[in-house]
Image (cartoon, rainbow, N blue to C red):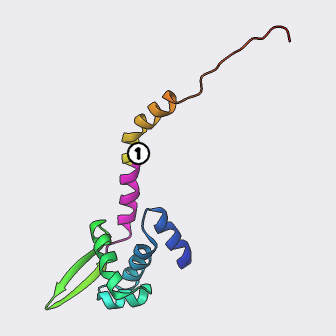
Amino acid sequence: MNKSQLLTFLEGLSLTANESKTYLAALSLGPTTIQNIADTAEIKRTTAYSVVKSLQQKGLIRQDIKGFKRFFVAEHPETLKQIVENKKSQLDKLLPDFLSLYTDQGWQSIVRHYQGL
């Protein structure tokens, strides 16, 4: 798979374009600084801070502190599988609600009978 296919897949998991680029950059770099992630992902360093924070909240990046330096590390790609499974379980829980809306809003048949002109 090429990089664009990976980016498209990650965006299909509800990641923004910048989140997708940042996650792939962090995966390829290993423990690294924000500046290296920003350079590899081709985004501004100031933008990288908010994107990394968002990815931390989603459980895709963690922060390690060594001495006085902060390093950011991408979580194992198996985490993506867990995200998909969580979304599937959420859908399974909400499916009855969707189905009730579907049947309540369904078409009603109306038959009209005309005689003459």
How many marks overall? 1
In the displayed structure image, the side of residue 88 where residue 3 appears, left or right: right
Question: How far from the left and from the top, in percent, is residue 51?
Answer: 34, 76
Tell me the amino acid under the disc marked 1.
Leu
Residue ID for mark 1 = 91
- Location of residue 37 by image quarter: bottom left
At 43% across and 39% down in the image, what residue appears? 95
For residue 99, above or below residue 37 = above
Helix, strand or loop at disc 1? helix
- Location of residue 45 by image quarter: bottom left
- Location of residue 15 by image quarter: bottom left
Question: How far from the left and from the top, in percent, is residue 96?
Answer: 41, 34
Question: How far from the left and from the top, in percent, is residue 9?
Answer: 50, 67
At 13% across and 91% down in the image, what residue appears? 67
At 49% across and 27% down in the image, what residue appears? 104
Quadrant location, the C terminus: top right
In the displayed structure image, the side of residue 26 where residue 100 appears, left or right: right
For residue 74, above or below residue 11 = below
Range of residues picked out in magenta:
74-88
For residue 49, above or below residue 16 = below
Q: Residue furthest right?
A: 117
Instruction: Specify the principal SS of the magenta part.
Output: helix
At 40% across and 61% down in the image, what residue appears? 81
- Would residue 9 be visible to someone looking at this image? yes
Quadrant location, the N terminus: bottom right
In the displayed structure image, the side of residue 116 where residue 54 appears, left or right: left
